[in-house]
Amino acid sequence: MCLGIPGRVVDVEDGPLRLAHVAFGDVVKEVSLAFVPLAVPGDYVVVHAGSGIEIIDEEKAGRVLETLRLMEEP
Amino acid sequence: MDFQLQCPVPLRHDTIQMAHGGGGRAMRDLLEAVMLPAFRNPALEARHDAAVVEAGGARLAFTTDTYVVRPRFFPGGDIGELAVYGTVNDLAMAGARPLFLSAGMVLEEGLPIEELKRVVESMRRAADRCGVTIVTGDTKVVDRGKGDGIFINTAGIGLVPEGLALGPASVRPGDAVLVSGDLGRHGVAVMSVREGIAFQTAVESDCGPLHGLASALLEGGVGVRCLRDATRGGLAAVLNEIATDAKVGVEAREEAIPVLPGVAGACELLGLDPFYVACEGRMVAFVAGADAPRALELLRGRPEGAGAALIGEVTEAHPGTVVLRTPLGTRRVLDLLSGEQLPRIC
Amino acid sequence: MRYLDEYRDPAAALRWVERIRALVTRPWNLMEVCGGQTHSIVRFGIDELLPEGVRLIHGPGCPVCVTPVELVDKAVAIAARPEVIFCSFGDMLRVPGSASDLFRVRSAGGDVRVVYSPLDAVAVARENPGRKVVFFAVGFETTAPANALSVKEAARLGLDNYSVLVSHVLVPPALEAVLGSPARIVDGLLAAGHVCAIMGTGEYHPIAARHRVPIVVTAFEPLDLLQGIHMTLKQLEEGRAEVENQYDRLVRPEGNPAAKAVIDEVFQVTDRAWRGIGVIPMSGLRLRESYAAFDAERIFQVQDVGGPESPHCRSGEVLQGILRPQECPAFGTLCTPDNPLGATMVSGEGACAAYYRYRRHGLA
C-alpha cells in the first residue's frame, strides 16, 4: 500500500486544501498540502493519492544516505 | 458460408471489455478465440502487423489500423498524424516501402468542422513527410453520443522486396534486440491531459514515422529478423509477442532501456512501469547478434534514431518468457498484462 | 529524481547484502506488511539477493486485494446505476466481486472513472451537479486522511451529490491476527513506512512486546528495504524484540497530527472483513454519524448487497506464510489470476499470483 513519491514544493496557496504545485523530477502536479501546514516552497514532501503526507527531514535524509552508502567499514 | 467457431481459449467475459483493446493478454485471447479461427489463412497466421501477400507478380504488404485516441489533440500530436504514421509504420515493419493509404472516417454528429480540418491537415502533413498518398477514403456520420468525435481507420499498401521475410519465424537465439529511442513518451503525453490524472510535463508524444529507420537497417547490410513498432502495451507487449510467436526467450537489461527522466518521473508518480507505456514512433528490431553494432550505428545516423540502444538478446532459455535484469543484477519477469496498465496507489 | 534514485544505488545495495550474509547464523522468516514494499521487492528482485535461509513472506499489505467480496459487489451495484459517476483509484477496477467487477460495469455502459486523488472525485461532483458522484474510499491509514479530506471538502462546498463507499482497513489489528495465530511462522516484521508516517509508531510497541517480534518501519527503495531487513535480522540474532524506525527521514514517532485529526473527525473504527481471511474486529474505518449524509452505502441502500467469500479460499493462511500457494487445493484450478478467489491471487504481487506467474514461465 501507499505509493508515496517525494517531490519539491514549488508554490502553495492559502485555503482549506492548501493547494500547491509540487515537482517530481520534470513533472509538476497540483496536490493538497493540508496535512503539512508547515511545508513551504523548497521543502520536499512525500505525496500519496494527491495529498502531501509529511515533510522530508533533509538533515536526517542526508545522514541516512551516508549510512546507507556504507562508504566506510563499520 | 457456415463455419464452426472453435474457441481454444475460453474467454472470461461474454461482452467486450476495455481490456480487449489494451494490447495485452485479453486482446490476444480475443483474437485467438474469435478472429483467427474465423479468418484462418497463412497470411494471418504469420501474426505480423502487416500481411505480406502476392498478387500479379508483386509482393505487397497490406495493413489496417483504427484510431480512437482520446483526447484527439495531445502534446506532440493528434489523431490524424497517428492515423497516418501508425499505418505507415506497420508497413515499414514488414520491410515494405509504404505507398498508398486509404482513410475511413466515422464522425460524430456535432463535431466542429474546424477540428476536422485540423485533423485532416495533420494527416496531409504526415503523409507528405512519409512520401505516401491517401488515394481513397470514406466518411460516415453517426448520431450524437454514438461516436466519441472521430474514429479514423487507415489501411495501407506498400511493396516488399523479393526474398525479404521479416517476422517472428526468423528470430533465433543469439539475435540482438534494439530499440530506436526512448520509451513511453506517447502514453505519458496523453495521460498528462486526461481528466482525473492531469499533470504538467514537457513530455510530448513520440508519434512519428519509422520507415526511414527500417530501410536504413534493411539497406545497410544488417541481418534483420523482425521489426515491430511499439504501440499499446509498450515494449513489454512487443517482446512478449515475439517471445511467444517465435518460441524463444528474451533477456533485456533495464539499465540499457532508454527512458526520459520526464517519463520516468510521471511513471513513478502514477505507479506505472514505463516498459508497458505506449509509444507511437519507436521501433524494436531483432537483428543477427553479430550485426548489432552496425545496426546501432545505422539507427543513430538518422535524427529519429538518435536515441537508439541495444537492450538485450534472444535466448534459448525460458522460451515464451521475457526476463529483465534489474539494476541490482537480479531478475524479474516482464509479463504480458491482461489489459491496460492503470495508475495505482497501492 | 531526488530522494528516490539515491536509494537505488546498486553498489551500495550489494554491500548491504554482504552485511546481511555476514550477520545471519540461522534461518529467519520476515514478513513485509505493505504492498508497496512487496512491489519494490519484486521490482528490484530483492528476495533473490538475500541468503537462502532468510525468507520474505508477503503480508496482508494490499488494501485493494483485501477488500472483501461484499464491498466490491456493493461498488458494482452502485456503479451500474445510470445517475452515478463512480470514481475510483485504478487499482480497484480489476478486483473481482461475486459476479462482476468495475471494468465490466464500465463496458456495460456504467460511468466509471479512474482518479489519482479523492479530491479529483469532488471536482467531478462539482462539475456534474445533476449526477451522483461516488468515490470508492479504500486504503490503509495512509489514504484515510485524503479520503476524509474529500468528505470535509464536499461538506464545505455544500455538495449534496458526493458520497463515499468506505472500505478502509487498519494495519495493527491485521498484524495482531497474523502474529496471534498458533501456526505463526513469522519471526520479524517490516512495517509500512507511509502508514506509520500518518499514524506514528506507538501502536507497534505493544504488538512487538506481546508477540516478542522485532518490528522495523521501512521506506520503500532497495537500500531502505535492505537496511530494514538488516536491522530486523540483527534484532533477531541478538534476541531483541523492539520497534525501530528505518524511515526516520519521514516517519515521526507521533505520526502526523493534522492527518490523524482529520481521520478522527470523519471516521470511526469498526469491524471489517478481509478478503480470504474473514472478519477482524475493530480493523476498519467507517464514516461517523455526523457524516452520514456522505455514506454511499446508506444513500444507495446497498447494506444488504454482497456475496460471501469463497469457501475454498485460504488466502489467510498464505498471507501468514503457513500455506504455500502450491499447497492450496484451489491453486491453479478454481483459483487463477484471471479468476482469483482471494487477496493473494487478486493482487499481481500476491504470493499466489506471483508464484503462478513464475511457475508458468518455468522460473520457479
Image (cartoon, helix red, strand yellow):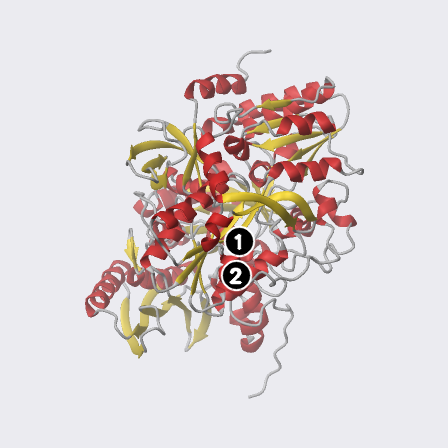
* Amino acid, disc 1: Met
Q: Secondary structure at mark 2?
A: helix
Q: Is residue C171 above or below residue B235?
A: above
Name the residue located 32 percent from the left edge and 58 percent from the top edge.
C127
Q: Position of residue C6 (x, y in %)?
A: 46, 26
Circles 1, 2 touching at the beta carbon (< 8 Å): yes
Q: Is residue B134 above or below residue B283?
A: below
Name the residue located 72 percent from the left edge and 60 percent from the top edge.
C334
Q: Which mark is residue B113?
A: none
Earlier residue among tags 1 and 2:
1
Q: Is residue C232 above or below residue C73?
A: above
For the C terminus of chain C, the image quarter is top right
Q: Which mark is residue C92?
A: 1
Q: Nearer the viewer, residue C79 or A42?
A: C79
Mark 2 neighbour class, 10 Å CA radius: few under 14, some 14 to 19, many 20 or more = many
Which residue in the rendered view is the most extreme toward the front? C290
Residue position marked by numbered label 2 in the rendering: C102
Q: Is residue B325 above or below residue B204?
A: above
Q: Position of residue B132 (x, y in %)?
A: 28, 65
Tell me how far mark 1 sits from mark 2, CA to CA.
8 Å
Q: Nearer the viewer, residue B284 or C123?
A: C123
Q: Position of residue B246 (x, y in %)?
A: 58, 57
